[in-house]
Image (cartoon, rainbow, N blue to C red):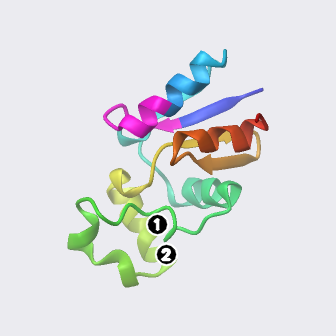
Amino acid sequence: MKITIYHNPRCSKSRQTLSLLTDAGFSPDVVDYQKTGWTVDGLRALFSAAHVTPKEALRVKTAPAPELSLKQATDAEILEAMVLHPILVERPIVQVGGDARICRPPERLWEILKKP
């Protein structure tokens, strides 16, 4: 089973989710999205797999979201901002095949791995 975690090593929730994965015996592909960046099409596909909208996947409380006034932005505007500022994407996101979850809290991981 291919598992990918879109990870921010500075985020405690992201680190906890990665630990849950490895402690359960999985070897996920770890993507540091702040280094690799995002594309609009990639984000659309990932959010579709996670069953969330761009607005639902937006980190609104941390910079630069407040400065960009994204609370009233369209999905297209939010996606473009996320490409320019990868930190705006809520984390971590775990993808297993065609399904994905924003793992906040980290225990949401079990929803996608179909474990109790």
Residue behind mark 2: 76
Q: Residue at x 51, y 48 (%)?
A: 104
User: On the image, numbered disc 1 is attached to which residue?
Assistant: 79
Whether residue 8 is in magenta: the answer is yes
The 10 Å Cα crowd at callout 1, few under 14, some 14 to 19, many 20 or more, is many
Looking at the image, residue 30 sits to the left or right of residue 11; the answer is right
Say which residue appears at 49% left-offset and 54% top-offset: 39
- Amino acid at the residue labelled 2: Ala
Question: Decide: marks 2, 1 in contact (CB < 8 A)?
Answer: yes
Bounds of the magenta span? 6-16
Would residue 40 be visible to someone looking at this image? Answer: yes
For the N terminus, which image quadrant?
top right
Residue 71 x %, y %: 37, 79
Can residue 36 be seen here? no
Disc 2, SS: helix
Quadrant of residue 32 within the rendered picture = top left
x 34%, y 66%: residue? 60
Q: Quadrant of residue 90?
A: bottom left
Which amino acid is tagged 1?
Leu
The image shows residue 49, relative to residue 79, as above or below, that is above
Asked if residue 13 lies in the magenta stretch, the reply is yes
Residue 70 picture location, percent across and down? 34, 76
Alpha carbon distance from label 2 to label 1 = 5 Å
